[in-house]
């Protein structure tokens, strides 16, 4: 309590309304009872405040600000972790964000749908040395052994996860999938032909999977349609 | 009014040091023989909009306006535009299609993949080929959960040459380019090799039904969309 002194020196405090919580730490002032108050209001300008809760409403994000005084300058900027943003919006998860892209502190895992299609012409009648999955060279040199006429060169523009090629009458097709649906070889693909073997797996050889792909062909001097998914 | 003239007593407040900006707006205390009325803005319940946001160390930082926040009803509003200003990757094109993420609705069409195994029907159904020829095959019902652009069903027949397969493929008509028209190709032994079927008796949707060669047989399948 402030010392009671002679009337000529002292002051009355009856109109004071302040409480300790109204005063910034560590400043002091007297209240109406003559009690010296030391401020208890935290000074967030000297802290590293973190948002306590995040909510989403009306298309905006609302971030709770921890209790205290803020200077309005960079020293009292508040931050929110990615996990906290997710707590305020369950849709803010990696599976809703573009793969390998960092968005507000969260790296996405969602693959975009990329589709390309077109046609390609097999003009090359040469037999290429594709190798079947058991190591058999598919050159047709042995009667009854599969062989492939020409090779399909397809400029996809991206590395496909799935590539299908078929001739105009849909009597032959060549298929590739990165999901190794027919086996574990990275560049393995399937070739089917109405006049030959059903689906025979091409294990290796000149097959290439990239922005430009090379698959075993199913004929020559013919147009083929193709579609690729990335 | 602090000075009391003629009173019998008063208080000495000389040892206090608060300044107006250190006291909440409208609150009054006494410091050094004078009343001091606070000027610190009270942001409780105001819900101000932050004017600056940025990324640092993987966290979102935002500027808090000058004043006092009580920690319970003192939230800062950040608009989607401000979040994008903080991180230019926060745009619709990086967000899943039709999903609202922190105030932005995504436009990115995702690549969907589904796979599984299922057993084909016991009885055959008549399918009509693109050339008008009818033939009987066993329906295989699969449930990708979305309408696929491509559907692939296969069964390993033997290990000749490391593996030979019977398979059925569907490619959506919209994607066939110069060879448009939904088609099903069946690769197996017999006369049905490589036939382009019309969509007669074929269903393509979140659940699909396509023809396969063998009945009552487990097929693997994979769908892309």
Image (cartoon, rainbow, N blue to C red):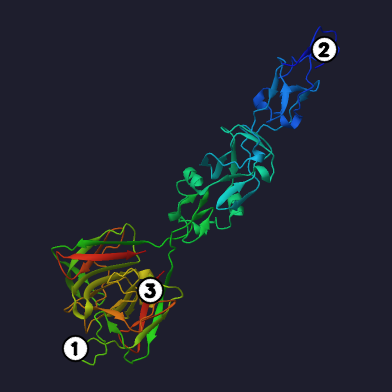
Question: Do pointers 3 and 1 mark residues of a single chain?
Answer: yes
Q: Secondary structure at mark 1?
A: loop
Judging by the rendered image, the residue that carries numbered circle 1 is A144
| Total numbered labels | 3
Left or right: A88, with B158 as reference point: right
Labelled pair 2, 3 in contact (Cβ < 8 Å): no
On what subunit does the disc labeled 2 rest? B
Q: Cα distance, mark 3 to mark 1?
A: 30 Å
- Distance from label 2 to label 3 (Cα)? 93 Å
- The chain that hosts pointer 3 is A
Number of residues whose C-alpha sits closer than 10 Å to that of mark 2, classed few (under 14), some (14–19) or many (20 or more): some
Crowding near pointer 3: few (<14 within 10 Å), some, many (20+)?
Answer: many
Q: For the residues marked 1 and 2, what is the alpha-carbon distance in whole angstroms? A: 119 Å
Q: Which residue is mark 3?
A: A227
Residue B201: tell me if it is visible. Answer: no
Q: Nearer the viewer, residue B36 or B155?
A: B36
Seen in the picture, residue A109 relative to A30 is either above or below; the reply is below
**Pointer 2 residue:** B4
Q: Nearer the viewer, mark 3 or mark 1?
A: 1
Closer to the camera in the image, A95 or B98: A95
Q: Is residue B83 left or right of residue A158?
A: right
């Amino acid at each position: 309590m402030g010392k009671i002194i002679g009337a000529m020196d002292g002051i009355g405090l009856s109109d004071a309304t302040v409480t300790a919580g109204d005063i910034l730490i560590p400043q002091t002032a007297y209240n109406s009872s003559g009690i010296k108050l030391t401020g208890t209001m935290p000074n967030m300008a000297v802290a590293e405040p973190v948002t306590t809760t995040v909510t989403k409403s009306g298309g905006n994000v609302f971030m709770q600000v921890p209790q205290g005084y803020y200077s309005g300058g960079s020293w009292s900027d508040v931050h929110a972790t990615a996990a906290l943003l997710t707590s305020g919006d369950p849709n803010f998860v990696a599976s809703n964000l573009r793969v390998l892209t960092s968005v507000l502190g969260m790296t996405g895992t969602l693959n975009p749908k990329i589709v390309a299609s077109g046609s390609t012409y097999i003009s090359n009648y040469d037999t290429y040395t594709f190798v079947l999955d058991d190591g058999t060279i598919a050159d047709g040199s042995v009667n009854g052994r599969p062989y492939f006429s020409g090779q399909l060169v397809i400029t996809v523009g991206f590395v496909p996860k799935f590539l299908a090629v078929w001739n105009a009458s849909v009597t032959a097709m060549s298929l590739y999938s990165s999901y190794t649906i027919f086996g574990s070889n990275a560049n393995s693909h399937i070739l089917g032909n109405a006049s030959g073997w059903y689906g025979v797996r091409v294990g290796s050889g000149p097959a290439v999977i990239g922005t430009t792909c090379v698959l075993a062909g199913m004929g020559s001097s013919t147009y083929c349609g193709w579609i690729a998914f990335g | 009014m602090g000075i009391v003239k003629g009173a019998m007593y008063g208080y000495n407040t000389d040892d206090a040091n608060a300044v107006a900006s250190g006291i909440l707006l409208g609150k009054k205390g006494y410091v050094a023989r004078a009343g001091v009325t606070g000027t610190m803005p009270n942001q409780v319940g105001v819900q101000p909009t932050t004017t600056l946001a940025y990324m640092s160390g993987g966290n979102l930082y935002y500027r808090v306006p000058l004043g006092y926040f009580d920690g319970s009803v003192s939230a800062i509003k950040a608009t989607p535009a401000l979040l994008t200003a903080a991180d230019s990757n926060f745009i619709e094109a990086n967000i899943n299609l039709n999903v609202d993420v922190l105030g932005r609705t995504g436009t990115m069409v995702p690549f969907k993949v589904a796979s599984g195994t299922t057993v084909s029907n016991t009885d055959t159904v008549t399918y009509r080929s693109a050339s008008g020829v009818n033939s009987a095959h066993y329906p295989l019902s699969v449930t990708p959960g979305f309408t696929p652009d491509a559907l692939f069903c296969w069964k390993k027949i033997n290990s000749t040459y490391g593996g030979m397969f019977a398979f059925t493929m569907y490619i959506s008509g919209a994607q066939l380019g110069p060879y448009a028209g939904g088609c099903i190709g069946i690769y197996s032994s017999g006369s049905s090799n490589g036939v382009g079927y019309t969509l007669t008796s074929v269903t393509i949707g979140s659940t699909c039904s396509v023809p396969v060669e063998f009945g009552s047989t487990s097929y693997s399948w994979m769908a892309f969309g």
